[in-house]
Image (tube, rainbow, N blue to C red):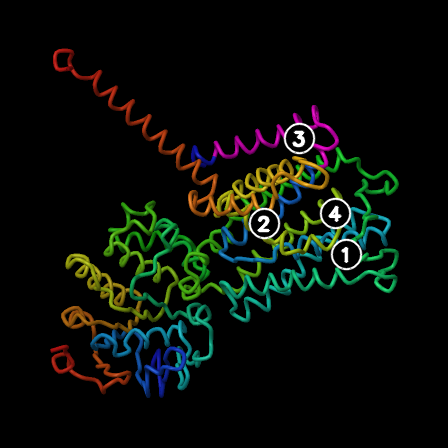
């Protein structure tokens, strides 16, 4: 492990400690709920960071797996006794759907922008479909899909064997933050394996990887499915933080994830998470600046657009890689200055200017 | 029976046909050269044989199996190695990682990487350097070693002397001849460098406008 890696893990550990100990100690309920939402969105950002940043697969419809898992969780949770089982089913459903979609895309040799278009289309089809499910005929067992309104009665996770004792918002927050760090570690470990190294090489030169003997379709399917499962974890936690609604599949949600990844830094895991937290906090802050009845001072979406434009123009690599590069330059400069100072001291006194 | 038998092969890019009625054979341990000017279809021939582009007609029988309809990764696993023009080293992976990556794809033990380092001593000082920062000659040697990590029985070698210094060119010739002797390796070599071809090839074919001529002596097939 390099010094830079060790420092990275140290910072991530410190962030985990702060989020899991310091924030709950002094936080208000609103902070906890917002924190759960941000963490579930950050998991969604992490899933896109994995498949786009490391495998080069630009999914413009990553929210499809996020929303699907949310809905499956809500429906299964309302029909089954056990919400943990519903959560497992939901994540499996998101992973299975990603595997099915990925199979048709990768075996059909669809890539680049076409892949983005297909994934976005799938997400928007789900959005349109769920939007029109108002009415009693759209009820699965005890779960009404609720059309535009979603499922406000989405059940809250409860400990196994205690279905009548659902977690409190503070506990959901802890769970969401812990899940975020667990997903981060899974992504990092996955990329350090032989499978992960192969995925990175395929991103760099797919044709060459195939000519060396790799069935690139299988590797891409594997990473896309893992990305779907991680987005599904985010969807389940979002369903527990708010409730499920068609907005989980919307164009805005899909666009936001891409903005978080670009602003945070494509090709890193921590960057998109930081991007998500910063922009979500900015959006929430701007939305709460009230300048009169039902009138916000600034439209958060407009600000998001400006931030993205500035980032693309000024910080092409994103916040984290730019900060790391800047830090690297500072360290190099300090070393050079120290080196010159030491050389100076080694010179005899009479030769010094 | 020949290691590779190509008959009536046609291939190209989309609607544009490049190769027509190509037929050739490569025997075990043989080095077959294909000479030709730029744009005659030499690289396209190797791409079609490796599966990088599909054949629109004809058969490619490798070790008794027609692989013309197989994807590139299956042909590679059968032992059809390909070192393309431009080397295509993975720039972010180190030299060692580039070789390990190829060994794993072919299910070879990683000891084969050390074997290659022994065979190509020039790799030793650059093992931990990223592929993208290596010189052209170093990349060429790495591309060759990486291909050999898959233990191919036939290597398709596309203009290996392009842009490299004469000392490395000579090193490549010596190493390839040594590999042929020790491993019984066969090579289908595409080149414009007549001297390099003369040093290596047992037999030379001439390619013009997507067609191969009959076997020719090197002097008559030369670029002059």
Residue A239: numbered disc: 4
Q: Secondary structure at mark 4?
A: helix
Q: Of the residues tagged 4 and 2, which is closer to the observer?
A: 2
Q: In whole angstroms, how far apart are the C-alphas of marks 3 and 4?
A: 20 Å
Q: Of the residues tagged 1 and 2, which is closer to the observer?
A: 1
Q: In whole angstroms, how far apart are the C-alphas of marks 1 and 3?
A: 34 Å
Chain under disc 3: A
Which residue is labeled 3 in the image?
A20
Q: Furthest-front residue in view?
A: A292
The reply to the same-chain question for discs 1 and 2 is: yes
- The image quarter containing residue A104 is bottom right
- The image quarter containing residue B28 is bottom left
| Closest to the observer, A70 or B38 | A70
- The image quarter containing residue A38 is top right
Q: Secondary structure at mark 3?
A: helix
Q: Which residues are magenta?
A: A6-33
State which tag comes first along the sequence, 3 or 2: 3
Q: Secondary structure at mark 1?
A: helix
């Amino acid at each position: 492990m390099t010094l830079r890696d060790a420092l990275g893990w140290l910072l991530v550990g410190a962030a985990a400690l702060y989020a899991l100990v310091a924030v709950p100690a002094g936080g208000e309920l609103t902070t906890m709920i917002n924190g759960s939402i941000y963490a579930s969105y950050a998991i969604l950002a992490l899933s896109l960071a994995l498949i786009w940043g490391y495998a080069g697969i630009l999914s413009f419809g990553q929210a499809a797996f996020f929303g699907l898992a949310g809905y499956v969780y809500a429906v299964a949770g309302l029909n089954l006794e056990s919400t943990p089982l519903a959560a497992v089913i939901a994540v499996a459903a998101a992973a299975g759907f990603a595997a099915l979609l990925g199979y048709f895309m990768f075996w059909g040799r669809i890539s680049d922008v076409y892949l983005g278009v297909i994934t976005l289309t799938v997400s928007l089809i789900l959005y349109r479909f769920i939007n029109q499910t108002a009415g009693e005929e759209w009820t699965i067992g005890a779960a009404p899909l609720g059309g535009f309104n979603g499922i406000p009665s989405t059940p809250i996770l409860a400990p196994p064997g205690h279905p009548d004792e659902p977690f409190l918002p503070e506990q959901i927050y802890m769970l969401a933050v812990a899940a975020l760090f667990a997903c981060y570690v899974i992504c990092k470990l996955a990329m350090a394996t032989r499978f992960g190294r192969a995925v990175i090489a395929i991103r760099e030169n797919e044709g060459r990887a195939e000519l060396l003997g790799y069935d690139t379709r299988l590797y891409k399917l594997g990473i896309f499915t893992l990305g779907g499962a991680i987005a599904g974890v985010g969807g389940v936690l979002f369903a527990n933080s708010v409730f499920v609604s068609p907005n989980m599949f919307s164009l805005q949600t899909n666009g936001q994830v891409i903005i978080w990844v670009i602003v945070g830094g494509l090709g890193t895991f921590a960057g998109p998470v930081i991007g998500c937290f910063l922009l979500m906090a900015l959006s929430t802050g701007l939305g709460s600046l009230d300048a009169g009845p039902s009138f916000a001072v600034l439209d958060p979406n407009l600000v998001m657009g400006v931030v993205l434009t500035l980032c693309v123009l000024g910080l092409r690599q994103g916040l984290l890689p730019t900060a790391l590069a800047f830090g690297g330059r500072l360290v190099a400069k300090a070393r050079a200055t120290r080196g010159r100072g030491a050389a100076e001291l080694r010179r005899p006194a009479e030769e010094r200017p | 029976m020949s290691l590779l038998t190509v008959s009536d092969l046609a291939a190209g890019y989309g609607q544009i046909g490049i190769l027509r009625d190509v037929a050739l054979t490569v025997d075990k341990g043989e080095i077959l050269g294909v000479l030709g000017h730029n744009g005659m279809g030499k690289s396209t021939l190797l791409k079609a044989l490796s599966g990088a582009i599909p054949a629109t007609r004809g058969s490619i029988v490798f070790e008794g199996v027609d692989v013309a309809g197989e994807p590139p990764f299956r042909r590679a696993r059968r032992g059809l190695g390909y070192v393309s023009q431009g080397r295509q080293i993975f720039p972010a992976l180190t030299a060692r990682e580039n070789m390990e990556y190829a060994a794993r794809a072919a299910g070879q033990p990683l000891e084969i990487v050390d074997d290659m380092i022994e065979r190509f001593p020039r790799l030793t000082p650059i093992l931990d350097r990223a592929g993208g920062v290596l010189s052209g000659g170093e990349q060429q040697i790495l591309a060759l070693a990486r291909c050999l990590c898959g233990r191919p029985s036939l290597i398709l070698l596309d203009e290996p002397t392009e842009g490299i210094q004469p000392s490395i060119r000579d090193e490549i010739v010596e190493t390839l001849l040594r590999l042929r002797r020790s491993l019984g390796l066969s090579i289908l070599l595409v080149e414009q460098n007549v001297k390099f071809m003369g040093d290596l090839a047992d037999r030379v074919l001439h390619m013009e406008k997507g067609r191969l001529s009959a076997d020719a002596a090197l002097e008559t097939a030369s670029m002059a």
